[in-house]
Image: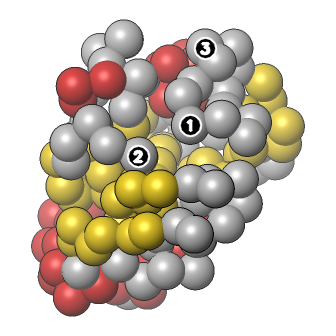
Amino acid sequence: MDKLKVIITREEIAKRIAELAAEIRRDYKDKNPLLIGVLKGSFVFLSDLVRTMNVPVEIDFTRLSSYGACTKTSGKIKVLKRLEIPIKGRHVLVVEDIVDSGLTVSFLLDYVKLRKPASLKLCTLFDKPSRRKIEVPIDYRGFTIPDVFVVGYGLDYNQQFRYLPDLCILEERN
C-alpha cells in the first residue's frame, strides 16, 4: 500500500502559479514567447500557467528521459520527442515540473541554445537543489523542496499519481 503525505497543497500551488504568471507576463510583455513544456510531468503546470498568464503564447513540447521506472536519474538523457516549432530568434521559456540533479534541464537548455533563440529562460514549479549535480539558471521558481521523492500535480512514480492535485511525498512503495 502506498502512503502519501501532502507537503504542498493545491491552494498553495495555485497561489504561487498566479505569482509566477504575473512575473512572466510582465517580463514577456509584447514578446510572443514560445513556451517549451517538458513531457510528461510539466503538462499540468504548463496548462495552469498558460491559462493564468492569459496572454498570447506559442507552445511546443519535448520529451526527455533519464528516469525510466526508477526514483533516481540514470544520468543518461534520451530525446523521446523533438521540438517542432522553429526557435531561432524567438523568446523561449522552458517550463519544467521539477529540477533536481540539473542533468536533464542542462541538456535541454544546451539543445535549445544551439537553435539560437533571442532569449532563453527557465521556469520550474519545484526545485530540489540538494540533489544538484549541474547548476542551472532558474529564472522563475515556484517552490524549493527537500530531498524526498514527490508525486502529484503532474509528477509520477512509474506513471502513477500524476492526477493528485497536491504535491505529496511517496513514503512507501509496494
Above or below, 8 against 63 in this view is below
Asked if residue 74 is positioned above or below residue 93 in the image, the reply reads above
Question: In the displayed structure, does residue 117 sit left or right of residue 75?
Answer: left
Describe the element under mark 3 as helix, strand or loop. loop
Residue at numbered disc 3: 75
Position above or below: 27 against 53: above
Residue 39, x across and y down, in percent: 67, 53
Residue type pointed to by label 1: Thr
Q: Secondary structure at mark 2?
A: loop
Residue behind mark 1: 71
Give left or right: position of 159 versus 82. left
In this picture, residue 97 sits left or right of residue 60: left
Q: Quadrant of residue 156?
A: bottom right
Q: Are marks 1 and 2 in contact (CB under 8 Å)?
A: yes
- Neighbours of disc 1 within 10 Å: few (<14), some (14-19), many (20+): few
Per the image, the residue denoted by label 2 is 149
